[in-house]
Image: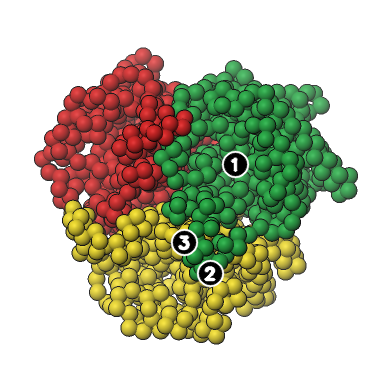
Chain colours: A green, B red, C yellow
């Protein structure tokens, strides 16, 4: 029993460390995707997001999501900390160890793991509305998302709320993290509008390829590694042979789904975009990873390949479609996280014992709630202070315009061919 | 017993995560080494290699390597999955736990670890023949290597085949991974021929220094970290004090060998190349890591420094020699993996109880088999479709020529001084 | 008992792997901060530092720090290795397992963890005196620091020396690693003097912003992750529920302190520097991490936010102050490590049961000893061979001047506006 407590806690901490690493993955992916003139801002913004998410989930979010959830939402109380018995044991009261080990793991190890998830959701939103939203506005939205919106949706699914009672299944956050993040991103994309010049009056779309492909690829591989922690840690315990078996199956499926997603996107990108696409292919791998997240515990491992491959195709098609709809999602957060997350959550009904109707209700409710809440927040902020940077700052870039620095001050850049603003 | 199962499995999974990370290491090392005009192709190629290796080892390779190996090769059957008892236990049949824990670890955790090794071998080949081989051809070779060639050599050594029966020892893949990868790379280098203009008619060699030193260094440090997982995880279990002692010795030796390799290469690079060489020094660290891989479990830790230092010297000399032989190995895969891998496998006879003759037979057989098989595959493909890109694509770079993108579209590059093609 | 031995050892090894990763963090942080013309040198230097530290701590340092420390310093004897009983057990003497498990962990796993700490201290020094100190001189200093200076200070605090006897507390190296590294850096900065042109005759300071912001940010995030290993591994065991509770508290506090440090530095950088500062903000996160290191085990987690925030403010103010004092600390190693390390060590008296007077005596003694010893070493070397590169090499950069390569040979750089030398 003592040992189970130790191993379960250690599992949260070690896998959690890999989830922390995803912050670097999102930062690199985004900073390499945007034009060089905005890359420094991405760096500061993402480290800030990670910090704000940590504090707001500590001060408010966790309790809303997990403490006394009565169907809809938990308690609005400040701070979250270890149990009294845990504090006593840390102080030397070994007679109370029996009391704490029944909890199965150290309270705060699970808090840490959860906090790293909410930071991931915030990073997803970030990637969609790059290059035009003001830093402080995004940080403000991050606070609202991580302190309130995410915890409410999370309470429904993981905190004992109505969806959990209905039997909705989401193993590692296919909906809680990815559909939530993707829905908030969609609202942001709509309110903020596209980057200036992205969609030209003549109907053509300005190509905005990654400014640094190496950094983008590094970011994707960081996320791939981080996902091992994300999904394996979500097993939540490591004390029985069943746990070990499940964790094995999870990582095998996670890796196969990513491979399936990548290869499918490689194959499909040529017919869709007219050439083999690097960025769509990398997004295919991420879509595969997202798709396996809702239900990664199964033993017919070939299904993970198929699941991921379908996600890769859906993601690539959705990317094409969003451009047709004149929605400017810079890194493809909506195809990767919302579309593949929804697909994976529904598909969990195929490989696991989740029910399709319940899964459908869950996804739809979360999209509706998070999109609406986020849209209102973005809109209110837009009316009060404006979410976008000025056209001048957008033209010269947020690095010089807002931070007063350049990401690569010593490198000569190609003069940009901009539409006049 | 249950606990041993849990810990052994966890060890495979956690250390395996670090081995996955080596994919990023190879990608960065290669992408930073080539000229900027080919860097995007490297990124896509390597993520693809990792995916293809995963699928082909899942669908074919593992069974060839491990299932019913009768001396030479295992069974050609599709898919690999958990045992029936494991599936039952995951489904709740706790009465069958006794049956599975005698296996010592979850079947698929070991599969995952093995799959990450085969992906490493494929990445090794990749680094040698950069900047001139067509993407689809390389991916095709990756499939053949990871589905057939590697598993056959692996079956001899780890699958119960004839070398294993002879007493050949290879703890963590000094031969299975590095000599195999290096031999396949050598065949590829010979068939593909050097990059245009690398060896000039007047006998001089065109210098092709890394285009991005920071990224190369990052790649090497990623590999260094990944090697911790590579070697420690190869202990295969973590359930007794002996295991823990062995794992400690392994990581201490791994790190000391890398340090020895680096410093030796730093010292030797000046007399050999006429100046302190950054790239040879970094390769020295990798050679040290490769050299310790075949036999890292010993307690005279100073020997690891010597072993690694000799590897660093051999690698540097071999790099110089390959250029004399007009073999164009872009990242130095042959010196780092084939030469240092062979050295380390033979040297295992010094620090561990391996026998020199057996080690010699093993290395020679693997080189002969893998080189020949790879040569045939490369040659057949070359005759049918040609392994090289056209001179035009080689001149403008594979990024624009094959992918239609640039790795750094906003940065102004120095016009290349090319030999006319 | 056997199991405790396994788990404690595994904890050192897994968390140690993350500490190894900090080498990449320092390398990226430094290489991205300096001007492009010096970046390759940083890469080679840092990989060399890591190697030299490993060897010198193996051959000399560890014994000085831990073996028979009589108040001041341990034994000057060569090499460090496993116990005889451990060697016997590895050789199969299972009857001696009882003997080794009373040691609680494999001897060499703790050695590895300690070695990674000393490498960190050396990396700290490196960051301060970039762009003007000769490679071989710095490597020589690294040897002296890691073989002698660090082990002596460490013996006082962790080896059973006089400070440990007084009750001085330093959980994970707030003083042993960060104050030591920062003090040695300060001595180096004074002896080496500022970069040419940094402080102009008219009293103005030449701005030297990071040349590659993405790489700097990546470096900081690598360090952030590495710190999880640094602090969690310092718990030193993982065998009881108390250990697991402590490790949870440690990681929660570590992450909150970093977040507090970052956000405080974001807020304070504008009034101090006149604009939102990216580099100061990232350093604020590092200062938060440093500040929690001396005493991370407490359960009033909100205090970690405050502690880190104060560190972020102190670090930012100290950065401003150092420039006024014409001390040229390139990455801000002194504010981040010396100032925040001292603050954290003193503040340990607030959150843990350390005594303020003792903490003060400890920090002051270590600063006095390490600064003096380092100053003498730097000065002696300076008199004998000179620590600085020639003005010509400083002008053209160490990459071309000392290594004969460029970090980005294909990218066109902005001609530098230098003061004539």
Q: CA distance from mark 1 to mark 3?
A: 36 Å
Front of the two marks 1 and 3: 3
Front of the two marks 2 and 1: 2
* SS label for mark 3: helix
The disc numbered 2 marks a residue on which chain?
A
Q: Which residue is mark 1?
A: A29
- Residue C347, compared with residue B207, is above or below; it is below
Which residue in the rendered view is the most extreme toward the top?
B384
Q: Quadrant of residue B157?
A: top left
| Residue in the picture at 29% in, 61% down | C101
Left or right side of C232 for A216: right
The location of residue B346, given as percent across then percent down, is 18, 44
The location of residue A104, given as percent across then percent down, is 52, 50
Q: Which residue is mark 3?
A: C243
Label 2 crowd (10 A; few <14 / some 14-19 / many >=20): few
Left or right side of B248 for C416: right
* SS label for mark 1: helix
Q: Which residue is mark 2?
A: A91
Q: CA distance from mark 2 to mark 1?
A: 44 Å
- Residue A146, compared with residue B106, is above or below; it is below
| Residue in the picture at 37% in, 36% down | B97
The location of residue C338, given as percent across then percent down, is 54, 73
- Image marks 3 and 2: residues in contact by CB distance under 8 Å: no
Of the two numbered discs 2 and 1 on the same chain, state the one appearing first in sequence: 1
- Residue B85, compared with residue A155, is above or below; it is above
Q: CA distance from mark 3 to mark 2?
A: 12 Å
């Amino acid at each position: 029993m003592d040992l189970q407590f130790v191993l379960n806690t250690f599992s949260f901490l070690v896998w959690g460390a890999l989830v922390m690493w995803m912050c670097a993955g999102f930062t690199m992916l985004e900073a390499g995707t945007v034009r060089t003139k905005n890359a420094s801002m991405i760096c500061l913004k993402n480290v800030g997001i990670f910090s704000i998410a940590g504090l707001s989930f500590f001060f408010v979010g966790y309790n809303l999501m997990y403490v006394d959830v009565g169907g809809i939402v938990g308690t609005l109380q400040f701070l979250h900390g270890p149990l009294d018995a845990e504090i006593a044991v840390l102080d030397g009261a070994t007679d109370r160890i029996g009391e704490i080990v029944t909890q199965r793991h150290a309270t705060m190890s699970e808090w840490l793991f959860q906090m790293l998830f909410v930071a991931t959701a915030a990073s997803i939103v970030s990637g969609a509305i790059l290059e035009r939203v003001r830093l402080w506005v995004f940080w403000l939205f991050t606070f609202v998302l991580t302190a309130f919106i995410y915890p409410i949706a999370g309470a429904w699914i993981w905190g004992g709320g109505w969806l959990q009672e209905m039997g909705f299944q989401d193993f590692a956050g296919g909906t809680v993290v990815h559909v939530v993040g993707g829905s908030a991103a969609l609202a942001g994309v709509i309110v903020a509008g596209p980057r200036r010049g992205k969609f030209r009056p003549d109907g053509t779309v300005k190509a905005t390829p990654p400014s640094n492909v190496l950094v983008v690829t590094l970011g994707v591989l960081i996320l791939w590694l981080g996902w091992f922690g994300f999904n394996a840690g979500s097993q939540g315990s490591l004390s029985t042979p069943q746990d070990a078996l499940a964790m094995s199956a999870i990582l095998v499926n996670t890796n196969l789904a990513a491979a399936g997603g990548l290869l499918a996107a490689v194959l499909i990108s040529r017919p869709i975009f007219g050439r083999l696409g690097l960025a769509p292919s990398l997004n295919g791998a991420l879509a595969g990873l997202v798709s396996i997240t809702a239900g990664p515990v199964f033993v017919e491992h070939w299904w993970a390949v198929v699941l991921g491959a379908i996600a890769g195709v859906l993601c690539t098609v959705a990317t094409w479609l969003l451009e047709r709809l004149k929605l400017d999602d810079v890194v493809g957060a909506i195809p990767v996280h919302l579309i593949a997350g929804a697909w994976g959550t529904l598909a969990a009904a195929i490989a696991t014992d989740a029910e399709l109707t319940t899964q459908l209700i869950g996804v739809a409710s979360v999209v509706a709630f998070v999109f609406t809440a986020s849209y209102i927040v973005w809109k209110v902020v837009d009316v009060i202070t404006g979410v976008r940077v000025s056209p001048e700052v957008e033209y010269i870039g947020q690095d010089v315009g807002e931070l007063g620095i350049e990401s690569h001050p010593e490198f000569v850049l190609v003069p940009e061919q901009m539409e006049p603003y």
